[in-house]
Amino acid sequence: MSPAHVTAAGGTDAHCGADGTVFHGSRATVVTQLPANQIGFPGDPATLTILASSSQGTLQYRWRKDGWPLTDDGPFLGSATPTLSIDAATPTNQGSYDVWRTDDCGDCVSAAAALVVASPGERCPGDTNCDKQVTLADTDPFVEVLLDPTAWTYPCTRSSADCNDSGAATFADIDPFVAVIGTTCP
């Protein structure tokens, strides 16, 4: 059959390709966790992870940002491993991250994960679950941070729990938190 007459239905991640794509890579890779979208603030660390295995040799990895291969320099570490670490995120780190996986049978790129680095001015006091609204759904993450200042279920929890702008989430933030319930963030 002529390649001009070959058609293909698209697949997802380990089956790489959109409708019309003919894939000549590895089918031996099994992905159990894709990189997840993240929201962070300048200076926060970020970690992107893929969990995958192959029945055809050792997997090799190459992380990319916006389609460009990364190396272990500047804020990036682990560009050739299953886990990419960004030491202290800056707005220039914002983008779309994916990872090429290669085994003895070929290679395949993962679905992309977005990293959003919000400016401090985008902080919304009380929006501890990052949904741009301050509702009762923000109560559990708020209390979590009050009980453990290092905790943050969501990327914005730590700074958004500081409702009185004192520089830290404390019990003094409870009344300001209650006051902003029902508001929508810009």
Image (cartoon, rainbow, N blue to C red):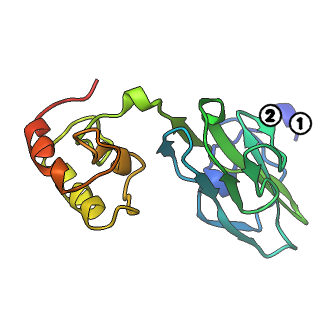
Q: Is residue 137 above or below residue 117?
A: below
The amino acid beneath tag 2 is His
What's the residue at 25%, 61% (across, down)? 146
Query: Which type of secondary structure does the marked residue at label 2 adopt?
Result: helix
Q: Residues within 10 Å of mark 1 (few under 14, many from 20)?
A: few
Quarter of the figure that contains the N terminus: top right
Q: Quadrant of residue 48?
A: bottom right
What's the residue at 28%, 38% (across, down)? 165
What's the residue at 8%, 38% (across, down)? 179
Circle number at residue 2: 1
* Distance between mark 1 and mark 2 Cα atoms: 6 Å
Residue that numbered label 2 is attached to: 5
The amino acid beneath tag 1 is Ser
Residue 144 pos. (x, y %) = 27, 63
Q: Are marks 1 and 2 in contact (CB under 8 Å)?
A: yes
Residue 92 pos. (x, y %) = 65, 30
Residue 182 pos. (x, y %) = 10, 36
> With 67 as the anchor, is 93 left or right in this view?
left
Query: Which type of secondary structure does the marked residue at label 1 adopt?
Result: loop
